[in-house]
């Protein structure tokens, strides 16, 4: 297990990051917000993913940290294997600040 995945696992175990599925995900430039996985700021020259959860608020993650989080989540949530989530992240990064109404990764 990589260092990032350990951090992602801890973030979920300590309740700093939800284990569920985000209601919205989008990407863009870093906003100097702290990453929910590695606890470091996400600088404007880095890509940031923003995950919105209906009842838990919004979380900011580095793209690499979000991969680790998805991978860790895949172990606990069998309905969303990492392989299916990964393209959704790349798509979210591509569309940048634009919000997506439907949940990415719902492709059958
Ligand atoms: Zn991070």
Image (cartoon, rainbow, N blue to C red):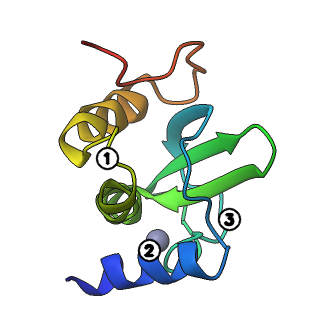
* Viewport quadrant of the C terminus: top left
Left or right: residue 17 versus residue 70 is: right
Q: Is residue 80 above or below residue 10?
A: above
Disc 1 Cβ-to-ligand 1 distance below 8 Å: no
Q: Quadrant of residue 79?
A: top left
Q: Which residue: 29% across, 14% down?
A: 107
Q: CA distance from mark 1 to mark 2?
A: 17 Å
Instruction: Kindly state the secondary structure of the residue where label 3 is placed.
Output: loop
Label 3 Cα crowd, 10 Å radius (few <14 / some 14-19 / many 20+): some
Say if mark 2 contacts mark 3, CB within 8 Å: no
Q: Residues within 10 Å of mark 1 (few under 14, many from 20)?
A: few
What mark, if any, has residue 78 been given in the picture? Answer: 1
Residues 102 and 98: in front is 102
Whether 106 is drawn above or below 85: the answer is: above
Q: Would you name the residue on which mark 3 appears?
A: 33
Judged by depth in the image, the label closer to the viewer, 2 or 3, is 2
Q: Name the one closer to the observer, 77 or 1.
A: 77
Residue 64 at least partly seen: yes
**Residue 17 locus on image (x, y percent):** 61, 65
């Amino acid at each position: 297990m990589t260092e990032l995945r350990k951090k992602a696992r801890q973030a979920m175990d300590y309740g700093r990051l939800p284990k569920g599925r985000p209601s919205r995900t989008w990407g863009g430039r870093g906003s100097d917000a702290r990453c929910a996985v590695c606890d470091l700021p996400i600088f404007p020259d880095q890509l940031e993913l923003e995950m919105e959860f209906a009842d838990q608020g919004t979380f900011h993650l580095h793209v690499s940290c979000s991969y680790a989080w998805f991978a860790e989540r895949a172990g606990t949530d069998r309905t969303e294997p990492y392989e299916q989530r990964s393209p959704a992240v790349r798509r979210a990064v591509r569309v940048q600040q634009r919000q997506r109404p439907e949940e990415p990764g719902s492709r059958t």
